[in-house]
Amino acid sequence: MAFSPATHRTYSQPGASARWALVAVAALGLLLSYGLYNRTAGERGPALVSEASSVLQSSAPGAAPARQPVGGSPAAADASAGAVASGTERWSAEGILFVTEGQAWDAASFAAVDEALSLLPAAVRDRLGNPALGPLRILVNEEGRSLDGDQPYRGAANFFSTGDGLNELVLFPHQRVSTVLHELGHAYNLRGVAAGQYARVLLEAEMQSFMAATGWRVVTPASVVAQTQDHARLDYAYSGSFMWPNRSHFDPLEDFANSFAMYFSDPDGLRAASPERFSWMQANLPK
């Protein structure tokens, strides 16, 4: 999720009939097969891909299955730490920094991030985050804290933020590869906007092209969008034929990040579910 100070609503229908409950279970099963399910902080109901969570645990939806520490001895732990250190050096050469001090990195968390980055073409990795804000910094902690210690969601969370004038991607430990890809999708999508000015991406030609291809329209006047920081405070209209079965909140930025994640983690699945999203990603993302 791209950080937004607004209250986020999950998509749920309390009190729905048993028939709709069965439909929801079937849809959830589809999402779990793609690894694209998580939960939003302080709210009830499913949220697509990577949102804040007050109860994010290794066994929670959206997190990878609980993993035991690598090995059972100090030597094994040292070997694991060495592997993580070696991997972080590899990515730092591309300007992607793994912040380790005060963080909860382990072999499982590193493996998910490493795999997600490896799935992206080098030309996409080179466009993660706004270059004027320095390298992309990736943090892993259980509190949803950015580098300055702030907790935008007051608890455990997965999010991409430029609010502190840096490109920061914050993850809860042991997240799925698809969750990491979703947040990297925000980093890519927001690479051209100033720090904290998330709504302004809606005025960019690339985002307007994505919205046109997928059925989105910003109802809020462009003059207001240009003066707004938080994209979640704007009004949208949607006329597309495809609906993500579960989502945290309904806006084009989350749709873009969902599509980005699925394009790189399950392209055939995206092609089948939404040919227009697959075609747009194929035509517009660097190879």
Image (cartoon, rainbow, N blue to C red):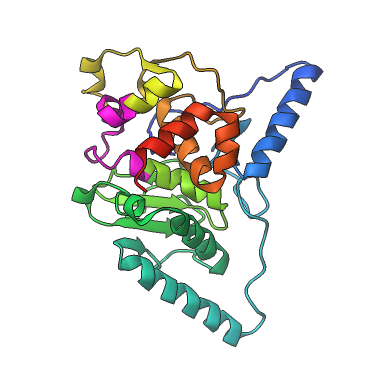
Give the image quarter of residue 227.
Answer: top left
In x, y percent, where is residue 39? 59, 38
In x, y percent, where is residue 202? 30, 26
Labels in figure, total: 0
In x, y percent, where is residue 74? 59, 85
- Residue 20 visible (yes or no): yes
Give the image quarter of residue 7.
Answer: top left
Quadrant location, the N terminus: top left
Side of 37 where 138 appears, left or right: left
Tell me: residue 40, above or below residue 180.
Answer: above
Give the residue at x 44% y 18%.
215
Give the extent of the magenta segment. 187-208
Q: Nearer the viewer, residue 223 or 260?
A: 260
Give the residue at x 24% y 41%.
195
Q: Nearer the viewer, residue 110 or 172?
A: 110
- Residue 8 visible (yes or no): no
Side of 82 where 39 appears, left or right: right
Tell me: residue 140, above or below residue 285.
Answer: below
* Residue 39 belongs to the span the image colors magenta: no
Side of 77 where 260 appears, left or right: left
Give the residue at x 29% y 61%.
95
* Residue 200 belongs to the span the image colors magenta: yes
Give the residue at x 44% y 64%.
103
In x, y percent, where is residue 122? 35, 56
In this view, the residue farthest toward the bottom is 75
Tell me: residue 182, above or below residue 86.
Answer: above
Q: Nearer the viewer, residue 147 or 246?
A: 246
In this view, the residue farthest toward the right is 18
